[in-house]
Amino acid sequence: MALEATLVFETELPLPFTVNNATNVLKGTVMKMADLMTAAPSDGDADIVAGILHGEKTASDGKTKAAVYRGGIFKMTAGGSITVGDALITNASSGAANEVITAGVNAENILGIALETATDTQTLLVMLGPRTINVA
């Protein structure tokens, strides 16, 4: 994957999430969360973030559990201008999986916090800390 999230500092151990046996997912993929602690590759803006996949999940390998980081510092790619301290969300509408963008005023599904300032396509350090906030 061109824009995989790369672990820089492990601050928490990854947790086991249920995954689809038939799906192939690359290490460093941002994962979205569904009910029953299930994770799948993020594919939408502001997905509810499960975390970042620890290791590759090979399709049809018989495994239905995969380790997912919910904390840590990762090198990620900016999908626009980001300022240090910004809350970040997924940016799947760009067509580039794993990009992060600054969360809007009413963003509910936060991926983490920017530890560096970056412009479009630059990499930056991100403190992973998935949170969902009901702003309604």
Image (cartoon, helix red, strand yellow):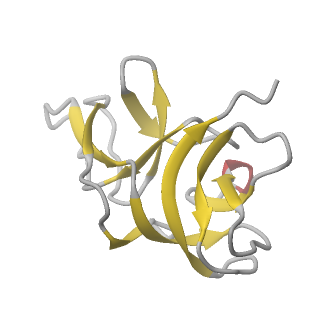
Front residue of 52 and 21:
52
Q: Position of residue 31 (x, y in %)?
A: 45, 43
Left or right placement of residue 77 versus residue 87 in this view: left
Q: Give how far across and how far down residue 69 sits, in percent.
A: 34, 51
**Can you say whether 77 is above or below 24 in the image?**
below
Residue placed at 74% from the left, 49% from the top? 93
Left or right of 34 on screen, residue 134:
right
Front in this rendered view, residue 40 or 67: 67
Query: Above or below — where is 71 with respect to 9?
Result: above
Q: Is residue 93 above or below residue 116?
A: above
* Quadrant in which the N terminus is drawn: bottom left
Q: Position of residue 114 (x, y in %)?
A: 62, 68
Q: Give coordinates of residue 100: x percent, y percent.
A: 64, 60
Residue located 67% across and 33% down the image? 133
Q: How many marks?
A: 0
Q: Residue furthest top?
A: 36
Name which residue lies at 50% across and 64% down: 127
Outermost residue toward the right?
A: 105
Q: Residue at x 32, y 44 (%)?
A: 24
Residue projecting furthest to the left: 62
Question: Which quarter of the figure is the C terminus placed in?
Answer: top right
Asked whether, in this view, residue 27 is left or right of residue 31, the answer is left
